Amino acid sequence: MYEITSLNDQGLGICYVNDKITFVSNTLIGDVVKLKIVKEHTKYNEAIVTRFLKNSPSKIKAKCPYFDKCGGCVLQNVNYNETLNFKKNKLQNILHKFAKIDVDVDIISSPKEFFYRNKISLKIKDSKIGYYSYGSNTLVEIKECIIASKAINEFIKEIPKFNIRNGEIVLRNNYNDELLIHIITNDDINIFPLDNYKVVGIIKNNELLKGEDHFIDIIDNKLFQVSYDSFFQVNREVASYIFKIIHKNIIKNKNVLDLYSGVGTLGINVCDISKTVYGIEIIKNAVLNSITNSKINNVFNTKYMLGDAAKVINKINDNIDVIIVDPPRNGLLRKEIDSIIKINPQQIFYVSCDPITLSRDLNLLCNNYNISKIIGLDMFPYTYHCESVCILERR
């Protein structure tokens, strides 16, 4: 038997088998288990539980019926406050380990613990619909996903009617429970009557089949056109907190550069207190969305540029005082960081969904900048992911 002594950053339990670190899924600190090693690596093992001999005092019953198979919401077997403590410690430990930054970080909770996601991607394999289990291509067939919005959950049962044998389906919904559906498959699909649902559009392999390829969503009373392939935060309530953090702390009446600007959300959020807001984005539809979003929000001090941020950033012929950056999980490229340092803004807002790449990038930026604040946000309740906003001030 083995006792789980800690959790790793992905929420997997840790024990030692013959003095070799072993990661065990679906376990908590204090669990005593019998286990089976499923993968052996040079420095560690991966294992699953064959029997629980003693349960952690923190353990509760997960609400999701697929919890022990799916591997997505790895923290559903503890109460919500415990998940916030896990993320607080994770963020602080990673910042200390990889950037030698010691801060006391609070995590802003999500107003919704369940049914918060406005976008999910489901795999379809041999006509079965679900998610891949953690770290594998094994499909876990599902009928519902309790972290996805209720509108998305209502539609999941209709997916088989498309007659997709193999592929992927991306479901998005907005504030009004309207749906955008993007199907990626080589199969011929059946477009069936959708009278009972607010389906705005159906897209297959980037080709519009029915309706529109975008809809309107709302964050903080601002309207945003969002195309099927444009980035938009999956938890709009927590995204609203990010809006407020940036708006409250940004220096006013300055030129702002919004890197990885998506549909223009973060930049438009500060247009009322900024001089000019520049946005750089590589997805064409997102740039078109941004232009539209400026108009529908009566904003007239934005300028958007299509292209790779690393290449386009040096084409701006203006003094940039503030940079807002919300990169993908792999963080900033070194040449982007070099360009930011060359621009030398007074202030940087770094919105991150991965504390490891954030720490890596802060190691470079903190040669020229001091950290004013780091704020954690629970964008993805019951998963191991943690969002954060880091505010840097030029030395």
Image (cartoon, rainbow, N blue to C red):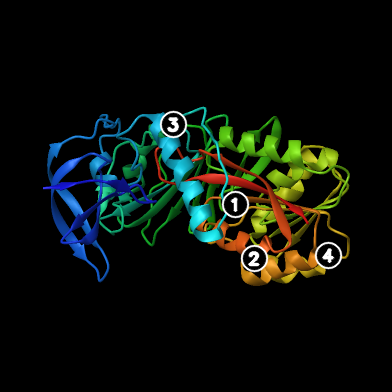
- Residue neighbourhood size for the residue with mark 4, other residues' Cα within 10 Å, grouped as few (<14), some (14–19), many (≥20): few
Which residue carries the number 4 mark?
Answer: 316
Amino acid at pointer 4? Ile
Q: Which of marks 1 and 3 is nearer the N terminus?
A: 3
Residue at horizontal 64 percent and vertical 39 percent from the top: 242
Badges 4 and 2: C-beta atoms under 8 Å apart?
A: no
| Residues at circles 1 and 3 in contact by the CB criterion of under 8 Å | no
**Along the line of sight, which residue is nearer the eye, 109 or 146?**
109
The circle drawn on residue 230 is 1
Percent position of residue 205, x then y: 48, 59
Pick the residue in front: 19 or 196.
Answer: 19
Q: Seen in the image, is 82 located left or right of residue 298? A: left
Give the residue number, with chain letter if any, for mark 2: 364
Mark 1 closeness class: few <14, some 14–19, many ≥20 residues within 10 Å: some
The front one of 63 and 352 is: 352
Nearest to viewer (mark 4 / mark 1) = 4
